[in-house]
Amino acid sequence: MADDSSEVVKEQSEAVAAADLKVTGEGPAFYQNLAYGNAVANQQAMNQIAQAAVGKIVEAIISTSPSEGGAAVAALQQLMKGAQTTPPVTP
């Protein structure tokens, strides 16, 4: 009986070791997928912010009358250029 129990313990130990190895091996892929998901969500949020900013700037340009002078239009055009640039990529 003692030989049988040591064999069972050995098999259980091997099964636990195999399961631990599987979980450890899958960890990097899980976190990489999580990082990709976060990057996509962040990009979507930045696109929504940029779209809202451009919409407000276009609204301001349209509502500016020619009698207000070229300086106001030039300033609004500079704002438009700034809103169109992409932010730097952060790791």
Image (cartoon, rainbow, N blue to C red):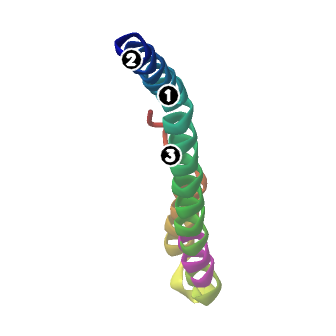
User: Relative to residue 12, is residue 2 depicted above or below?
Assistant: above
| Residue drawn 52% across the image and 85% down it | 68
Give how far across and how far down residue 11 sits, in percent.
48, 18
Q: Quadrant of the N terminus?
A: top left
Residue 86 in view (yes/no): no
Residue 61 in view (yes/no): yes
Q: Are marks 3 and 2 in contact (CB under 8 Å)?
A: no
For residue 3, side relative to residue 35 (left or right): left
Segment colored magenta: 53-59
On the image, numbered disc 1 is attached to which residue?
19
Secondary-structure class at tag 3: loop
Q: Residue furthest toward the left?
A: 2
Q: Of tags 1 and 3, which is closer to the observer?
A: 1
On the image, numbered disc 3 is attached to which residue?
87
| Residue drawn 59% across the image and 60% down it | 44
Q: Quadrant of residue 54?
A: bottom right
Q: Find the distance from the CA under tag 1 to the CA under tag 2.
A: 27 Å
User: Relative to residue 17, is residue 86 depicted above or below?
Assistant: below
- Residue type at mark 1: give it: Ala
On the image, numbered disc 2 is attached to which residue?
1
- Residue type at mark 3: give it: Pro
Secondary-structure class at tag 2: loop
Q: Which mark is residue 63?
A: none
For residue 54, side relative to residue 14 (left or right): right
Q: Of tags 1 and 2, which is closer to the observer?
A: 2
